[in-house]
Image (tube, rainbow, N blue to C red):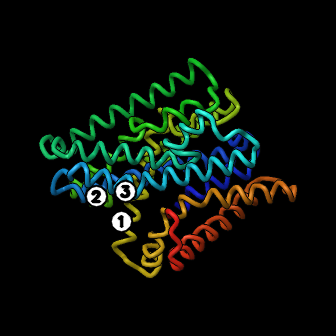
Amino acid sequence: MLFVVVWHSIQLATTENVGSAAWTRVTGGFLTFAVPVFLIISGYLMQLSLASGQQPWKKFGIHKLRRIGFPLLVWSAIYIVLSNLLLGWPLLTWNNLWLLFTGYIHLWYLFVLLQLLFLHNWLVPQIRKYGAGRILLIAASISGVFYLFSSLLLVWTGNDHHWFEWHLGKFFPGWAVFYFWGIYLAAVPSVMPRLQRHTLWLFLLVLASFSLFYTALSHEVETYGDFVRLYFLISGLPFQLAASTLVLVLCRKWEERAGKLFILSAETGRDTFGIYLIHVVYIYILGLLWSGLGLTKGPFISTLTAIAVWYASIYTVRFCRNRHIPIPL
């Protein structure tokens, strides 16, 4: 979640085209592992939950829609109203209706997660019958084709001003490989210890794959002037998979040591969802403040923004919880 806040803060505190500066090209490309990590962990934990069998659809659906779908609708509505009032745009449009149900700005992740959760519950019998490995292979093939199609479409049609990622990127095929990789790690417990024994090789794979990814991002920015594709470049898929896996492996090693810093991090973990939902409100506020002060945007402002947003979000979530304020955090 910290990486998500950092990236959104960078997007605020840069020039109009985020990819135009070399430092944002490096950080933007590198931080694309954050969403895959969330999806891997989601698949991992959900597989443990569903290991005993498929859950009844009514109970499963009501729980997931209440826990994830309701905050998605409420906070999409909040951000739609806030954004359009600030920018002077009309509220009642077909585009805003689309954004309401599929997630405004960063909330698209919840829409993707809901799709994968329901798909997972439906596939429980197939996972038990055919094994998680075969299902992972199918998911990897679907995501690979999606990434390849996205990359080819960029070459064929040029700059679509983020249309592909902001619309088709809200559907599960592009993200399936990460979620089902998490399922595989939970279903085959022997894999994680093997990965832990080869951390160095995994780290070298991350470096090599990022070099390839960064070269592709640089070419994209030089050709189209911006990150038209940040996530769905075929050259980025190996890096995102390797980097998110490395983060998970390192976290498991950290967990095994169970030091004071890990315990503090684990205790802060319950604030994560609330931080995710609310942090862009503070980014909006700081964006107006920086513009009003006429400050030069760049790495310093990005760092300052990330720190301020992180702590403001944490304390807002904790304040609401301690005061029993009934808002969907």
Q: In the visual, does 171 lie left or right of 21? A: left
Give amino acid for label 3: Ile
Residue ID at (65%, 58%): 281
Give the crowd class for mark 1: few <14, some 14-19, many >=20 residues within 10 Å: some
Nearer to the camera, 8 or 206: 8
* Numbered label attached to residue 252: 1
Residue placed furthest toward the top:
156
* Numbered label attached to residue 41: 3
Nearer to the camera, 118 or 138: 118
Residues at marks 2 and 3, CA–CA distance in whole angstroms: 13 Å
Residues at marks 1 and 3, CA–CA distance in whole angstroms: 11 Å
Q: Which residue is mark 2?
A: 192
Q: In the visual, does 88 lie left or right of 295? A: left
Give amino acid for label 2: Met
Labels 2, 3: front one:
3
Give amino acid for label 1: Arg
Q: In the visual, does 58 lie left or right of 80? A: left
Where disc 2 sits, the SS reads helix
**Callouts 1 and 3 close, C-beta under 8 Å:** no
